[in-house]
Image (tube, rainbow, N blue to C red):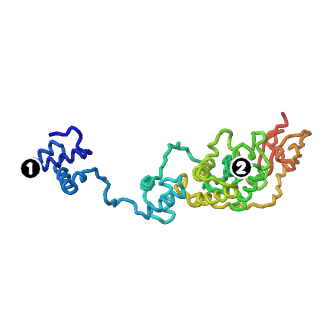
Amino acid sequence: MRFSMPFQGREEARVEACRLALIEGTNRRQLCRRLKISPTTLYKLLDRYRSDGAAGLAERSRRPHRSPGRSDAVVEAAVLAVRRENPAWGGRKIAASLRRQGIAAPAPSTITQILRRHGEAMSAPGQKLWKRFEHGEPNALWQMDFKGEVAFGGGELHPLTVLDDHSRYSVVLQAANNQRRQTVQGAVQAAFERYGLPNAILTDNGPPWGYTDDHWLTKFGVWLIEHGVMPWHSPPCHPQSHGKNERFNRTLKIELLDRCSFADLGQAQKAFDAWRQRYNHHRPHDALGLAVPAERYRPSTRVFKQTVEPYAYQPDDIVRWVDINGRFSFANQRLKASKALSGKHIALRPTQRDGVFDIVFRHVTLRSIDLNQ
């Protein structure tokens, strides 16, 4: 006889096969050919049937009793501990973190399997590959921005973020309740006192950084220049120039802001400080070859000084004072500098073209004027 349904997976067919095989005089080899099973399979079924009856023929798990290749429980516990502390990390980052702790880490693919086995869903969205550019040394450039307003119970929360371009080291992560110049300047000055001065700071074109090409200089920019730091601005509608800070803000959102709520600014700052410590010293960074930012960062040798030092312009410079309206007198004209420079001395520096002068504030050339026009 032949079964009308596939033999595998049908308990009733197995029971019938065993009963037919146990009939006296049955040719079991022929029965196997009719059932399209091997004699070995039939005799295994008969052993189970004789031992436990029909119940012994139920489907059994094919999972091995032992898994010699499975990760040690201690290693799995270490993997899950890192994952619980950093819910957005994948296999590569967790492996690098374990090695940094002196733990023999399994392969990233093995870590991914461990996470899946324990119900830790992993997402792998497609990412566009960008050509990366970075400055060759720490403190050559810092990138600064606000992470937008974050809703929370204690009023307004505006995370201020400042990142070193070379190392991705977070030098400022401030829980601010506004975006005013005094708030920014206080946080940046604290970073200057702790880490020293960068050569330049890159921001976008919104307040309090700057506005338009004609009014790019603000009082905050003037303060930076007076302390020997060049204010840079990214081109309008070009977020790629600010890419590292944008990426940092996205990581901050995924790993902290989306997972926590804060009752007040103090609680937010405490959480920011803890996350910043982990980001700088424990979180492997793909762009750094899975090193952590602290391994590539070092403080600046340029020391911040509270008092602005006098500045000596060049001998051929024509020095002028800027009034409260941001204007100065030159060649019988009232010319515009910037209101941000009110009360400051600027210089007009002759160029190789007759009647054309550069307007200079300390070490920064602001723009040129042509008296011929």
Image side of residue 144 versus residue 106, left or right: right
Circles 1 and 2 in contact, beta carbons < 8 Å: no
Q: How many marks?
A: 2
Label 1 environment density (alpha carbons within 10 Å; few <14, some 14–19, many ≥20): few
Q: Amino acid at mark 1?
A: Glu
The quadrant holding residue 5 is top left
Amino acid identity at mark 2: Glu
- The residue depicted at 18 percent of the width and 55 percent of the height is 50
Q: Is residue 341 left or right of residue 255?
A: right
Residue 330: x, y in percent? 89, 42
Per the image, the residue denoted by label 1 is 24
Q: Residue 69 location in percent, x, y?
A: 35, 59
Looking at the rendered structure, the secondary structure element under dot 1 is: loop
Task: Check the picture and name the quadrant holding the C terminus.
Answer: top right
Q: Nearer the viewer, mark 1 or mark 2?
A: 1
The Cα atoms of the two marked residues, 1 and 2, are separated by 88 Å
Quarter of the image containing the N terminus? top left
Give residue 313's position: percent from left, percent from top: 82, 52
Residue drawn where x is 68% and y is 48% of the image = 146
Marks 1 and 2, the one that precedes in the sequence: 1
Q: Position of residue 157 (x, y in %)?
A: 69, 50
Is the residue marked by circle 2 packed among few (<14), some (14-19), or many (20+) residues within 10 Å?
some
> In terms of depth relative to the viewer, which is nearer, 181 or 120?
120
Residue occupying the far left of the picture: 25
The one nearer the camera, 162 or 112, is: 112
The residue wearing badge 2 is: 156
